[in-house]
């Protein structure tokens, strides 16, 4: 990799996690180029990234499946590394429209990797997910936990991981001069927003995830929250998940980017790391934390368990600490307060007046 300032291509850079990554990259002195088809993100996010940082980025409104457009971008820009966030991400929708998810996520990724190889850009941070893991009775998942995604969304992530491992292995076998250097980052449950309240999660329609749903109940857009199951074998009966502040999460990407230049990747390779806090919070803990920030109760009702939901699982984050020098810094209060700050400043997301 070349000396600073490195230019990082961020796919899906207008999305929830991608936009926060752009802020951290720009503030760290990187040049940023964004590709986004805006199918589930808003261009306003890019304007706000530039406002927060006081720096500019270059934006291409393109789809990764358009190989001609992708080749032109790599021919125009001098890219040093890629952070690949672009992809559809709703588990429920993936079960209803699996073909769409395989086409967008897997084929789009293949198209990207082909363009990268042609341009001899082989440094990649991939946005993966804890959904690649097999569901077991084990509560804490380390990177060697058995893989076995149970829905089309998770399977697209697992497939892309397999493709990347194969690309890296092929280069290792021929002792390539410019080998693939790839880090797979398996997220647990990203929540929160930038402390400025200017960028955050802006789901289309009814939110799939807990925090945006609670905040929309709190602001009056939705009547009440459904808590799916209060009879799990957990301290308060509700499901426990490993929630991580989105800013902590994207800082993990910058640590991963730096790691590609260390001795771990001298000869190329592909390695996975968990990004999680290493412990969980229950649904009721999240609700009560939100109530403390609000100073009033959240309306909720208990609903039956959802099929396939586990009682509890969370990350073993030791590998990321030992090899990437990364760990979470923000508290549950930070996650909830920053979510509420974003929601109150943007009651209708990026379409707010």
Image (spheres, rainbow, N blue to C red):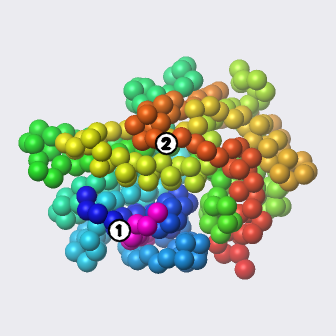
Secondary structure beneath dot 2 equals loop
Spatial separation of the CA atoms under disc 1 and disc 2: 22 Å
Q: Based on the picture, tell me whether residue 54 belongs to the magenta stretch.
A: no
Count the labels in the image: 2
Q: Position of residue 289 (x, y in %)?
A: 79, 44
Residue occupying the point 39% across, 70% down? 31
Q: Position of residue 101 (x, y in %)?
A: 42, 53
Drawn side of residue 160 relative to residue 228, left or right? left
The foreground one among 38 and 235 is 235
Drawn side of residue 287 relative to residue 20, left or right? right
Residue holding disc 1: 5
Residue holding disc 2: 326
Point out the tag, 1 or 2, that comes first from the N-terminus: 1
Residue 30 in which image quadrant:
bottom left
Residue occupying the point 47% across, 56% down? 88
Image quadrant where one finds the C terminus: bottom right
Crowding at dot 2, Cα within 10 Å, few <14 / some 14-19 / many 20+, comes out as many
Q: Is residue 121 above or below residue 53?
A: above
Q: Position of residue 247 (x, y in %)?
A: 57, 54
Image quadrant where one finds the N terminus: bottom left
Residue 169 seen in render: yes
Q: Position of residue 349 (x, y in %)?
A: 67, 68
Residue occupying the point 57% across, 24% down? 139
Q: Which residues are magenta?
A: 28-37
Q: Based on the picture, tell me whether residue 36 belongs to the magenta stretch.
A: yes
Residue 152 seen in render: no
The foreground one among 8 and 228 is 8
């Amino acid at each position: 990799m070349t000396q600073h300032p490195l230019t990082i291509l961020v796919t899906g850079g207008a999305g929830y996690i991608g936009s926060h990554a752009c802020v951290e990259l720009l503030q760290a002195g990187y040049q940023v180029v964004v590709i986004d088809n805006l199918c589930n993100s808003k261009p306003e996010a890019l304007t706000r990234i530039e406002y927060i940082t006081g720096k500019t980025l270059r934006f291409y409104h393109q789809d990764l499946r358009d190989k001609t457009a992708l080749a032109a971008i790599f021919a125009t820009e001098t890219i040093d590394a890629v952070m690949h966030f672009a992809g559809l991400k709703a588990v429920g929708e993936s079960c209803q429209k699996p073909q769409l998810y395989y086409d967008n996520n897997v084929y789009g990724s293949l198209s990207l990797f082909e363009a990268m190889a042609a341009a001899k850009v082989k440094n990649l941070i991939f946005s993966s997910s804890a959904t690649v893991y097999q569901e077991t009775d084990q509560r804490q998942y380390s990177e060697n936990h058995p893989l076995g995604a149970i829905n089309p969304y998770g399977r697209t992530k697992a497939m892309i991981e397999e493709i990347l491992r194969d690309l890296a292995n092929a280069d290792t076998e021929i002792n390539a001069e410019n080998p693939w250097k790839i880090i797979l980052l398996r997220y647990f449950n990203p929540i929160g927003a930038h402390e400025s309240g200017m960028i955050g999660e802006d789901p289309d329609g009814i939110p799939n995830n807990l925090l945006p749903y609670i905040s929309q109940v709190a602001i009056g857009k939705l009547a009440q929250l459904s808590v799916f199951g209060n009879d799990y074998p957990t301290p308060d009966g509700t499901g426990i998940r490993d929630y991580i502040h989105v800013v902590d999460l994207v800082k993990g990407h910058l640590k991963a980017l730096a790691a590609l230049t260390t001795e771990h990747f001298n000869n190329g390779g592909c390695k996975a790391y968990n990004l999680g806090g290493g412990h969980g919070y229950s649904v009721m803990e999240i609700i009560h934390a939100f109530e403390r920030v609000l100073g009033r109760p959240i309306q909720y009702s208990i609903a039956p368990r959802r099929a396939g939901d586990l009682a509890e699982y969370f990350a073993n984050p030791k590998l990321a600490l030992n090899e990437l020098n990364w760990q979470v810094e923000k508290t549950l209060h930070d996650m909830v307060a920053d979510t509420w700050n974003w929601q109150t400043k943007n009651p209708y997301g990026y379409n707010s007046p």
